[in-house]
Image (spheres, rainbow, N blue to C red):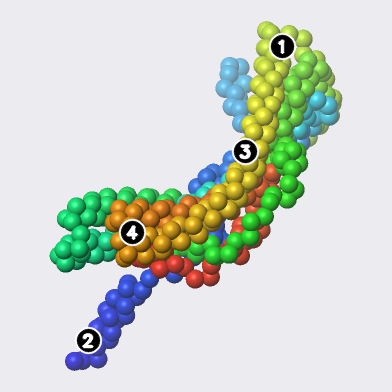
Amino acid sequence: MSFPSRLAALAVAALCAGCCLPAAAEDLLEVYAQARAADPVLAGARSVLGQQQELAVQARAPLLPQWSAQLSEQRQDGGAGQHGVTHGITHSLTQVLVDLSQLRSWHAAQTLADAEGARVRAAEADLCARVARAYFGVLTAQAALTTAQAIEDAYGQQVAQAQSRFEAKLSASLDVEQARAYFELARGSTAQAREELLDARQAVAQLTGRMPGALHPLAPELAMLMPDPADPQAWVAQALRDNPSLQAASLAVTAGDQRVAAARAAHLPTLSAGLDGQRLSGSAVNSDITGRYNTTVGLKLTIPLFAGGATESQKRQAVFQREQLRDDLEGARRAMTRETQAQYQAVLSALSQMRTAGAAVQAADKALASTRSGLDLGARSMTDLLLAIQTQSNARNAWEQARHRYVLSKLLLQQAAGALGEPQLAAVNTLLDPAPSAAAVTAAR
């Protein structure tokens, strides 16, 4: 074989070997970094912030100097020898000195930019929460699939054992058929769990733009800690003070007040200074002024008298808009109070479920061992054993779900309190097992 042929064969072999390798394991922070770089929701919030910042620049522009220049050429062709050309250069420089309406409008635009900045912070916290939901959604679906697969395998073994006992005339055919019925039902549950795991992985891909690899599960040992502080009202007070969504709504109300002030100031006089210059030249220009540069400096006072009712209408409209923003803020505060209390109770509930599920796992393990011994002695039936296997698997699944719910509820409580960010995700990342489970590696292939 020639050297180029050997090189091509080696390249194909390396490519095939790379395709056979399992996807690299990923932890919570890695998924978050991918989502932060690719999430369209966060990118959209940043774009809205940029738009509002530019609107603030545009609102400030009328308060700054305005300078314009014009070049003109006029040709005169009339009777009695009146022919000629006039060239003109004019410029105008104006500066607003007093315009309270425009000043208040600029302040409102700046406040709205600050509000959009708060919404970006809220979007960043929401991304943390969505990543955590999607990540633990995969882990929960993975645990459910592991449970379903364990039940299916156990029922498959029981079908084989029941068949052997029937062939040895130690049991009736009813035991075989009953075991097969449980096995077929378990196969259906496994297929459904596999579908739910695929959908959970797609939820991660929706955030990151790519299918995730194997995800690190929670470590077996997980400290069960109460929220700190252990007072729901303290969490509510922090949420009302620090939640960025509420801060954005409050800034929107402030901007509404400033727009009302701007509408009211539209009745007030405005004062501006101006500097105008002109130079004319050409055959049609009087020789006394041709080539001369004329400058005019002056002040302009404008007093609004009547605008057909538009000014009063705009003032009423601004008031209505401000009242709507105040109502929205009050509604958001009430919703946030409820959300914070609900997440606090969710943490307590998850802690309780972890304790009860852990006790259930221990009891189910003992019950399964006792049932197996009883079946060997003839004191228990095949039905008892199948139910014991199902109970143990369900207890372990409930324990895993309670652990995931506990960690996620604490993160959502921190989000409501305005304290969720990358440091909080990093703290949760330390609770993960460094090695992904075999089921996670299999799912990532």
Out of 25 and 439, give the one closest to the viewer: 439
> Which dot marks residue 342?
3
- What residue do we see at 69% from left, 45% from top? 418
- What residue do we see at 66% from left, 39% from top? 340
Residue 374 versus residue 301 in the image, above or below: below
Q: CA distance from mark 1 to mark 2?
A: 86 Å
Of the residues under marks 1 and 3, which one precedes in the sequence?
1
Q: Are marks 1 and 3 in contact (CB under 8 Å)?
A: no
Q: Amino acid at mark 2?
A: Ser
Q: Are marks 3 and 2 in contact (CB under 8 Å)?
A: no
Q: Quadrant of the N terminus?
A: bottom left
- Residue 186 appears anywhere in the view: no
> Which dot marks residue 312?
1
- Residue 223 appears anywhere in the view: yes
Out of 272 and 16, give the one closest to the viewer: 16
Whether residue 313 sits left or right of residue 356 in the image: it is: right
Q: For numbered disc 4, what is the local secondary structure?
A: loop
Q: For numbered disc 2, what is the local secondary structure?
A: helix
> Which dot marks residue 225?
none
